[in-house]
Image (spheres, grey):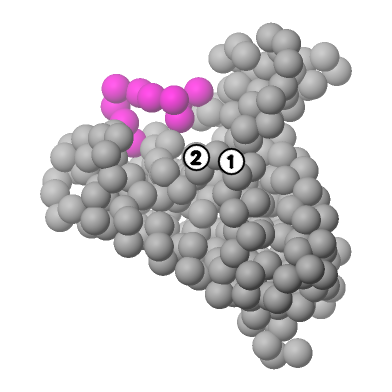
Amino acid sequence: MKKLFARFVAALRFLTIIPVPGKIGHGSAELAGSMLFFPFIGLCIGCCAAAVSWLLWLVFPPSVAAVLLTLVLLGFSGGLHLDGLADTADGFFSARPREKILAIMRDSRIGAMGVIALVLILVLKISALASLDRAEAFKAALLMPVAGRCAILILMALLPYARPEGGLGTLFYTRRSRLTGIWAFLFFCLLAWLLAGSGFGLPVLFPGITVIAFAWFCKKMIGGATGDTLGAACELSEACTALACSALAWSA
């Protein structure tokens, strides 16, 4: 039980900016075993974001509430995954060979394609959330962080690690990566079904297709995944989940 708690804390430290006192969860072994708890961390973030969304939609019009909710979701991760999206966009759309793409993605500076990717993903999230009423926004806020963290595990199950010299992402790659990816998919399907009922197909289908297509693109460009592409998968899945919730609301 103590080992499981240490892994949960490691996942909480890695995926959020929530301060956790003490030294528990700092070791590489705990970090490597923390993948199992990524969906639960997403659920914790989602519960907090959903509660905030309920208040925001009471106080503000949807257009303003959507911007504030997006900032709340961004704040929980400290922009970790957005940074990965920007680096991925800079590398993938640089029209360079594989080795140069990986070098560009490691560069801490952001380029034009990274800025464009950030603007587009934020506009997609905000516009989708702004189309929802209070009850629908509550569900979207709960689902989005879970979809993003599950997408990280699913992408890891689909692709090998791309950097031959290794990196932070190698800590998470284990022989159980595929099983963890299946677990993440089932976890999200169950949550989507509980929240959306018979309409749960769209919140699963939109991010699911996106992750599969993105995995194919990553394989083509760099031969696998890196920490940056895992962050990009998280952001893309969150945006697609918001779009799915918007489509469900519009069709209703």
For residue 173: magenta? Answer: no
Q: Is residue 46 above or below residue 241?
A: above
Q: Residues within 10 Å of mark 1 (few under 14, many from 20)?
A: some
Relative to 235, 65 lies left or right: right
Q: CA distance from mark 1 to mark 2?
A: 6 Å
Q: Residue 115: x and y, percent?
A: 32, 56
- View extreme (bottom): residue: 251
Chief SS of the magenta region: loop
Q: Residue at x 69, y 25 (%)?
A: 19
Q: Is residue 87 above or below residue 60?
A: above
Secondary structure of the residue carrying numbered label 1: helix
Residue at image mark 1: 77
Residue at image mark 2: 80
Looking at the image, do the residues carrying marks 1 and 2 touch, with CB atoms under 8 Å apart?
Answer: yes
Q: Disc 2 marks which amino acid?
A: Leu
Q: Quadrant of residue 36?
A: top right
The magenta span reads: 162-171
Q: Residue at x 53, y 50 (%)?
A: 234
Q: Residue 45: x and y, percent?
A: 72, 46
Residue closer to the observer: 150 or 160? 150
Q: Residues within 10 Å of mark 2 (few under 14, many from 20)?
A: some
The reply to whether residue 153 is visible in this rendering is no
